[in-house]
Every structure is written in C-alpha cells, then in structure tokens.
Image (cartoon, grey):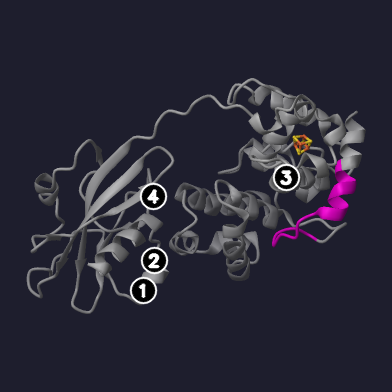
Amino acid sequence: MTMTHATRLLDWYDRHRRTLPWRAPAGKRSAPYLVWLSEIMLQQTTVATVGDYFHRFVKRWPTVEALAGAPIDEVLSAWAGLGYYARARNLHACARAVTEQHGGVFPRGEADLLALPGIGPYTAAAIRAIAFDEPASAVDGNVERVVARLFAIETPLPDAKAEINLRAAALVPQRRAGDYAQAMMDLGATVCTPRSPRCVICPLMAGCSARKRGIAEELPRRAPKAERPTRRGLAFVLTRRDGAVLLRKRPTKGLLGGMDEVPSSDWREGTLSIVEALKQAPVPARWKVLDGGIRHTFTHFHLELAVAHAVAATSGLAKLAPGSAWCTVDQMTERALPTVMRKVIEHAAKG
Ligand code: SF4
C-alpha cells in the first residue's frame, strides 16, 4: 500500500508541482541553505508573503557564511514584518553555528541538525528530505491534515500527533524522499485543503478512508483552544518638528526581543485607565490621546493600544533615556520595527 501511495503521489507531483522561489527544478535538489531559510521563514507565514523576503535575503546574503557575518540588527530589520522575531534571532545564531562548527556546510544527520538553534524535528526532517533526499518524514500542518484524512484519524489534535507521525513516517518511500516530502506539502496546500478538499482530482482518492466515510472536511479534529486574552496599553508617539519619532529598544529576551518600539505603558488585561497610563509617558509633554487605536494579535494574546501623541519641545529633550533614539522618516524603513509599531505610528500620523 505504501509504495502505491508514494508512486501515485510522485506521478501527480511530476505533473502538478508548484513552482516556488526556493524549489529546485525537477530532478535537482535545492541547496540546504535555501531549504533551511525557506522553512524557517514559512513557519507561521504564508508562501505568498515569504516569496519577497526569501528573494531579498538570498540576494543580500547568498551563503550561510554571509548571513552569519551580518550584524544581527540588519537581519532583524530585513526580517521585520515576518513576525515571530525569536525566529530571526535563531536564524542568525544557526547561521553562525553552521559556519563555526560545521565549516559553513549544513550537516545531514538528524542529531546534528537538531542541535542547531531554531531547528526542531519538522525543520530537520524537511532539510534532510529536500536537500539530501534522506527518507525523513517532515510533518507540517498540511501533511498532518492529509494523513489524518487518509487514515480517518478522529482523535483531536494535539493528541492525534503521535499517531499521525507514525502513519506519516510509514508512508515515506526510500527513493525520491525529497520529492515525496514536497509532494505531500503541495497536495495539502492545493488539493487536500482545510475546507472543501478536492477529492475528485486527488491522486490518493482510492485509498483515502475519510473520503470513503464522507468526513474528509471534518478532519483533523481539534481540541477547543483556550481563548486568547486581550491586553491593553497606551503607546506614546513623540515626534520632532521634522517628523522624526522617538523609539526605544525592547529587551533582548522575550516578545519582540531586541526590536525597536514606540514607548508605551505596560500591557495589561482589563480596562485601560488613560490617567494611570499617562503617568508612564517617556518624557513630560503635552500628550494628546487620539481617537480610536490599533489592534494586533500575537500568538498568546490580542493587544489593543490607544495612542497618545505629542510634539517634542525643542528644550528639555537633551537627555534621552538609555536605549532611546530619534528615528527620522528616512530611517524608518531601515529599522527593525515590528508591524504592531508601524501600525501605531501610522495611526498617530492620521491624527
Ligand atoms: Fe484529502 Fe480527499 Fe485526497 Fe483524501 S481523497 S487525501 S481527503 S483530497
């Protein structure tokens, strides 16, 4: 059964494979650096978004050594907009480790890959399969869905993971393992889609239990998620007469670690007291709280920020708090400014 599945899927892949910026032409293998870079970028982000970032990164840092040699601030600012900045830090740390410990050549062994920063079981398997053609089983969300349906696994996620992983591993062929991994990803992305799977054109239709039982669209089941809490705060946009904005650096560890930010009050659950929040202004100024605000969703919480704006007086600003600096309009695109902070600045600009 396994070979039938793999053969059918590979035949389908040969005809319908997606063209992706990081994917090698048919019959060729992508360099491990490109596979790794794309896989890290694709975590939690769509193929469409990643394309431009991938091109820019590869143009600027064509090799893992080049990336390792780049200052971390440049990497973070090139990453800005992709979110989940801990990944960008790990990306850089991983490039350094590959350069320093492996002479700039990605290892192909599972244990060596897992020892590198930011590489978990999925990424290690994807690199081994796609870059080295090793029969490793790379199970991402797409593959999880396909396998849960093929075997009609009704246990909800995340409990179903162990069974899905076992089933997925048993399907991996010894030959063309890299193409097989990419074929499963493509099938999940284009045919076995979360809603309305296109079973009638699916190469695996004949052996698919969920389709036979008419429950494909319901799988995989998921345990109900805990509600994301909402935190609230007040952001302080202080501008100079030339349009420059006061920014400060966030602590290296934690959410948006090491990124630039507009100063703000604490972010807390519950109702925001503007009077209390204004006491946390970075400098005394004539703060005007603007109508509306911005909303942003992080992995574990929603954030609602009200925005206060003030124009800096020419006197009294000689001393900025450590870690704070003016950012001119021209510098804005160069800075490692997360999306949430860009929203705040745009809101203040609208007044
Ligand atoms: Fe998915 Fe349908 Fe194919 Fe089964 S037959 S793998 S449910 S697209």
Residue appearing at x 34%, y 60% in the figure = 343
Q: Tag 3, which secondary structure?
A: helix
Q: In front here: 273 or 129? A: 273
Q: Tag 2, which secondary structure?
A: loop
Residue occupied by mark 3? 185
Left or right of 306 on screen, residue 15 = right
Residue occupied by mark 4? 256
Mark 1 and mark 4: Cα distance apart in space? 19 Å
Residue occupied by mark 2? 335
- Can residue 133 be seen here? The reply is no
Image coordinates of residue 81 in percent, x first then y, are: 46, 59
How packed mark 3 is, by other alpha carbons closer than 10 Å (few <14, some 14-19, many 20 or more), is many
The answer to whether residue 329 is above or below residue 184 is below
Q: Tag 1, which secondary structure?
A: loop
Q: In front here: 264 or 185? A: 185
Q: Nearer the viewer, mark 3 or mark 1?
A: 3
Q: Which label number is shown at residue 331?
A: 1
Q: Is residue 11 magenta?
A: yes
- Disc 1 residue type? Gln
- Disc 3 residue type? Met
Mark 2 and mark 3: Cα distance apart in space? 34 Å
- Can residue 87 be seen here? The reply is yes
Of callouts 3 and 1, which one flags the residue occurring earlier in the amino acid sequence?
A: 3
Of callouts 2 and 4, which one flags the residue occurring earlier in the amino acid sequence?
A: 4
Indicate the quadrant of ligand 1 in the picture. top right
The answer to whether residue 205 is above or below residue 262 is above
- Disc 4 residue type? Leu
Image coordinates of residue 250 in percent, x first then y, are: 32, 52
How packed mark 4 is, by other alpha carbons closer than 10 Å (few <14, some 14-19, many 20 or more), is some
- Disc 2 residue type? Arg
Residues rendered magenta in the picture: 9-24
